[in-house]
Image: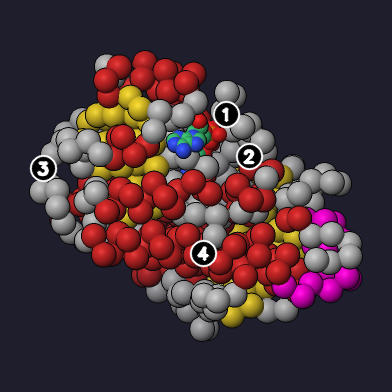
Amino acid sequence: MTTPPRVPLRVGIIGCGNVALNFHVPAYQAVPAHFTVAALADPTPERLELGRTTAGLAAERVYTDALDLIARDDIDVVDVCTPQHLHRDIVVAAARAGKHILCEKPLAATPADAQAMVEAADDADVVLGVVHNYLFFPEVVAARRLIDSGALGDVRTVVVDMLGVVDSPGATGYQPRWRHDPAAAGGGVLMDMLHGVYLAEHLLAEPVERVSGYVDAATPGDAVEGLALCRLETAHRAGMVNIGWGLGPGGIRITGSKGRLILRYHDEGTMPWAPFESMTMTTESGTETVDLPSGQELAPLIATALRDTVVDLADAILGRRSPAAPGSAALRTLESTVGVYQSAAQGTTVALPLDPASPTHRRGVIGLNDLDIPATSPVRQRHLFGLTSQGA
Ligand SMILES: NC(=O)c1ccc[n+]([C@@H]2O[C@H](COP(=O)([O-])OP(=O)(O)OC[C@H]3O[C@@H](n4cnc5c(N)ncnc54)[C@H](O)[C@@H]3O)[C@@H](O)[C@H]2O)c1
């Protein structure tokens, strides 16, 4: 480690889009004993200026080129808030400069990029934490605690429904529809909401070893999926993760050998748009409501989870322990997600980790174009991810 940890840690934020300005800047500003926002970078002038005024920084602390920010020797932590296809070069440069890193999810658009980032952080002995912020939602923390207590017996299944996802555009001034570009986003609603994938694995409390899935477009002609049904298998357990843009239902259901746990959201909607409503545990003794405060609305909920995420990062940097979502865990989540796309295209179950030489490891969802995808594949028939009817 080249930067001796001392608080407040000085953060440079790269990317001044929606998540950075609505949630990251306020999260650091909420914990001034831990962090100070010291610099920003964004090549889009109007976003950079909006960021500068939001963070209250002088003009000499903002950059159009991320590498100029990384070159500052008064930055301890680089926080990466660009779209995911741009994460790799920034994270690798930051690690080589000895900076600790917080990176937005998904860690990258391809497993190969994510692996390079994890290796760069390991080589430089810096912390690489990833924003898997739903891990900090109070009902998720409570559910995992109940599972660990043994109250449900052995966990058998976890079902995460997020079929009411809102298709939020990116910041105006940049490219509001980058989430619909498979080369930039690395997928559609599933990639954007891979929160559901890491939540399922977290509640299964075992690493995912095999995946399979079905994906479909929400709108005919869209290049990315708007619906994804995923099956995640661990050594002894299985999860189902159903994610879609639209107005479908949400919620989490966990089955154990001694009982079940059901997490409900307002109007049976999808977290975090629908606030948490109740969690009930049913065992042989009957059904009880777990005592939890009612859930927050979207903005305060994400604000609190981001604040918890950055405090967790500070603890990791200062205490040299692993953050809640280290790069290695986020790489696994990304591989599970890309594996689902491969399964949906090929009609097979996909074993993890992906073969590093495989097209989907190297190029993510775009790598499907290098695989033998049958003409009957729904992914080919829908022309998702650049696939055509005829094949390459
Ligand atoms: N954890 C969460 O709950 C959550 C929520 C929203 C977004 N995200 C993630 O955050 C990331 C950004 O999403 P967003 O919604 O803020 O996107 P956005 O479109 O609102 O903003 C992207 C910003 O990146 C900037 N940018 C582009 N190229 C850049 C470069 N080379 N260097 C620096 N900045 C650059 C753009 O100018 C723009 O300001 C994505 O990876 C997304 O998945 C996470």
- Prevailing secondary structure of the magenta residues: loop
Q: Residue 384 lies in what quarter of the image? A: bottom right
Structural distance between the alpha carbons of marks 2 and 4: 19 Å
Q: Is residue 155 above or below residue 2?
A: below
**Amino acid type shown at disc 3:** Arg
Name the secondary structure under disc 2. helix
Q: Is residue 388 above or below residue 377?
A: above
Residue at image mark 2:
178
CB of mark 2 near ligand 1 (< 8 Å): yes
The tag earlier along the polypeptide, 3 or 4, is: 3
Is disc 3 in contact with disc 4, using a CB cutoff of under 8 Å?
A: no
Q: Nearer the viewer, mark 3 or mark 4?
A: 4
Q: Which residues are magenta?
A: 371-384
Query: In the depicted view, which residue is nearer to us: 147 or 70?
Result: 70
Q: Amino acid at mark 2?
A: Trp
First in sequence, mark 1 or 4: give its number: 4
Residue under pointer 3: 6
Q: Position of residue 96 (x, y in %)?
A: 27, 54
Earlier along the polypeptide chain: callout 3 or callout 2?
3
Classify residue 42 as left or right of residue 218.
Answer: left
Color style of the picture: secondary structure
**Residue 273 placed where, x, y %?**
59, 38
**Decide: marks 2, 4 in contact (CB < 8 A)?**
no
Would you name the residue on which mark 4 appears? 111
Callout 4: SS: helix
- In three-dimensional space, the C-alpha distance between marks 3 and 4, rounded to whole angstroms, equals 33 Å
Among the 4 quarters of the image, the one containing residue 29: top left
Q: Residue at x 42, y 23 (%)?
A: 48
Q: Amino acid at mark 1?
A: Tyr
As measured in the structure, the alpha-carbon distance from the residue carrying label 3 to the one carrying label 1 is 35 Å
Q: Which residue is mark 1?
A: 174
